[in-house]
Image (cartoon, coloured by chain):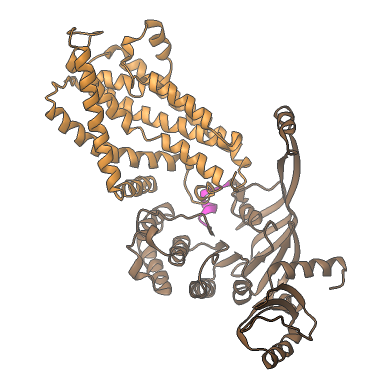
Chain colours: A brown, B orange
Amino acid sequence: MNIIQTKNLTKTYQRFTKEPGLKESIKSLFKREFVTKTAVADFDITVQEGEFIGLIGPNGAGKTTLVKMLTGIIAPTSGEISVVSYYPNHLENDFKKQYAVVMGQKSQLFFELSAADTFLLFKELYHIPEEEFQKNLDYFVKLFGVSEILDVQVRTLSLGERMKMELIVALLHNPKILFLDEPTIGLDAVAQKQIRKFLKEVNETKGTTIILTSHYMEDIKLLCKRCVVINGGVKLYDGDTDTLFQKYQTHKKITISLEQEEYCSLNQEYTLLEELPYKITLLIRKELSQELLKDVLSRYELSDITIEEEDIGNVVERIYDDKSGVPT
Amino acid sequence: MKKYLEIAKIIFKSQLAWRFDIAVNVLFTIVKIIFAYLIWNNIFTDQQVIAGFTFHSMLSYYIINSFLSQLDMSDSVSNEISSKIRGGTFSKYMVIPVNIQGYFIAQSAGSSVFYLIFNFIAAIVWIFIFRIRFAFTAHPLYIIAALFMMLIGLLFMIQLNYFLGLLTLKFQDIGLFLMIKNNILLFITGSMIPLTLLPGIIVEVMRYLPFYYVTYLPSMLLIGRNGDEMLPGIILLSVWSVIFVIINKFTYQRLRVKYDGVGI
């Protein structure tokens, strides 16, 4: 069953522009000039109930705008949109009970009180029956292992603990869809891992449809079977996550730190990102990375080495080039 | 209805978290009473009665009026809406199943009840310490009318501030509107001086504005004066409230589409 469906969904904004200088400021007092910025353009997407979808793209790609339209926070400029058979921007209370949204910096928690106080408020806001409330609360508290901090003032919680509470608040009423905008941003590796585990469990056991936007490739790779790549408001890719990364995440980012002050001279073909007397950061094709590592280990004395997946920006750029016929 | 009660409750609980705030608030009430005592004591040295007020009835008016003024927590409504719209976090209210105006009414009610309790205790203590012969009316109808008017008055103030807060969606900054509102309020609500001290024509004009009935008239009724204005006051204030219900509904529906959910 389609739980979300959009067709030619478009959102444009009017932005005020002004040349620098006092003269231009005075001129703008009488006559304003605006430019139209398209945040999302002719976007088609269909989401089935129970799916876990990753929305990826660089900053300003249109991911958050899309989520805002799907949750009804902003109205589309044109196109069709249906979420759980509702037109989101009508903002009907019955519609709002069907979903939950967790946006990184927009907290629903009351910082002066304990998270348990906010849970009680949400119980009333969503008319959650006592038995269901208790059952859900017990389930999520156990899953996150947060029973010890339920009565602690929210403002004293760590970022990771706060995000866990934020997720519990969002899920208490058993929403059909959970929209997550950068839920792991700023969290340490342990908290990120816990949140991922939690989301996976919720998706699998409760059948909650989850739409996740994230800059972290790890989030998308580990959680989402399907992912949608968006850039400049346009959908560039919609399909299997593994295929996407196999096809387009072709490079590794390697940082090599040396014991002594010297410059690395490497035989493999790579793109240099940064070079310092002690350190070199480069981008190399995945198939060449093993060879490079062997080479470096045999010839240099290393103090550290890190291997990372390349940034989302490179992947998006590659998809874009691929679609436009530019050779990669 | 229960959800709005829970909103009021959580705001009340939030206020209790700030112990220093509570102490300062009680102190502030005390300081206000001391100042009023000193000023009016000086003014009444040469005269027994000014504009129908004796020293004790003037102090009673002042205590009641400042008590009612402090109950009005609606200022925070416009400020909060404005800062949330400007910061792009207003969406947190849009995604939960509540009427947003109802949310803010409940929020203000939670704050008002909090201040009602603490200011009431402070006022009682200081009336006793200064041995003020409190000129409180014994007329039950006056008391009921004053309380009712006070309630609609607070509701009206929340609606007005909600409206001003929403204007951020159109004007992006509402500092000027708030400044105008605050200055008018300070004067018209009689917080500075009893309105009977002003020229008759000015008071006559003010009678058609809602602010006159928010704290001034309830204060006067509670000290047993202006009984003839009771009924017109309730009607006028109710009409203003209904007008603002309609204005706010229209304004929200019209302006919310301008919200883009990003910081200004």
Q: Is B24 placed above or below A292 here?
A: above
Q: Is residue B163 left or right of residue B200?
A: right
Residue A97: give x, y in percent of width and height: 50, 55
Which sits in the foreground, B250 or A15? A15
Residue B119: give x, y in percent of width and height: 24, 35
Q: Is A106 placed above or below B236 here?
A: below
Q: Is residue A129 left or right of residue B87?
A: left
The verdict on residue B24 being magenta is no
Quadrant of the frame with the C terminus of chain A: bottom right
Quadrant of the frame with the N terminus of chain A: bottom right
Q: Is residue A26 left or right of residue B120?
A: right
Q: Which residues are magenta?
A: A91-99
Which sits in the foreground, B221 or A267? A267
Give residue B86's quadrant in the image.
top right
The verdict on residue A92 being magenta is yes
Please give the name of the residue rendered at 18% of the width and 7% of the height, measured from the top-left corner: B46
Give residue B255's quadrant in the image.
top right
Residue A47: give x, y in percent of width and height: 66, 65
